[in-house]
Image (cartoon, helix red, strand yellow):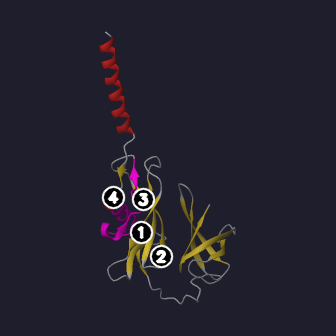
Amino acid sequence: MVKRGRRLYWTLFAVVGIASRALAANFPITAEQVSAATVRSGLHATAAQITLPGSIVSTTKTPVLRVESIRRMADHSMAVRMECGDASECLPFYVKIQLDENGEKAAVPNSMGQPHLVETEPRFSQRAPLIRAGEQVTLELDGEHVRICVPVISIENGRLGEKIRVRGATNHQIYRAEVTDPATLKGRF
């Protein structure tokens, strides 16, 4: 009877151990999954253009990934912040997307969600402001689970990457936001 009890104990121990490992399984997130998410967001990047920073894992085999933000880098690439649709599936992470083989252009979404071309060599002088005081532009405010686009009027001139003050077109509230292109600023709330 004692042998039978021990055997049952070890059998249950093994089953519970295997089940707990299955529940805590981590599935690698692949460049192909990231590529599919970029295509859904309007940023058309192939798996070959994507570099993952080491091993990124999810608690599910096929997580729903989404592009949270895009930042142009000096080395003709973009840093893209990715998140899982369900925050319990993975932690937010960044991927690097190398621009096309010419190193000149890549399709990215504009403030209306439609893809447009971004040039790595800006048409504008680095000294000349992209946004001038008095211009109406769009402020994209990003929160933890929401993105709001607000029409604003620039109070200051601003170059790419600079933080400037803008005023809400309807509510006259003052915001401080980063210049991302000639028609868009990014901020957080």
Residue named by callout 1: 96
**Looking at the image, do the residues carrying marks 1 and 4 touch, with CB atoms under 8 Å apart?**
no
Residue bearing mark 2:
73
User: At numbered mark 1, what does the secondary structure look like: helix, strand or loop?
Assistant: strand
Q: Earlier in the sequence, mark 1 or mark 4?
A: 4
Which numbered circle lies on residue 30? 4
User: Residue 173, percent across and down?
Assistant: 69, 67
Q: Which quadrant is the N terminus positioned in? A: top left
Residue drawn at 53 percent across, 57 percent down = 146
Residue type at the position of mark 3: Arg
Q: Tell me if label 3 and label 2 are in contact, CB under 8 Å.
A: no
Task: Give the amino acid type for the residue marked by disc 2 in the picture.
Answer: Met
Q: CA distance from mark 3 to mark 2?
A: 20 Å
Q: Which residue is mark 3?
A: 66
Q: Secondary structure at mark 3?
A: strand
**Which quadrant: the C terminus?**
bottom right
Image location (x, y in percent) of residue 24: 40, 41
Q: Which mark is residue 74?
A: none
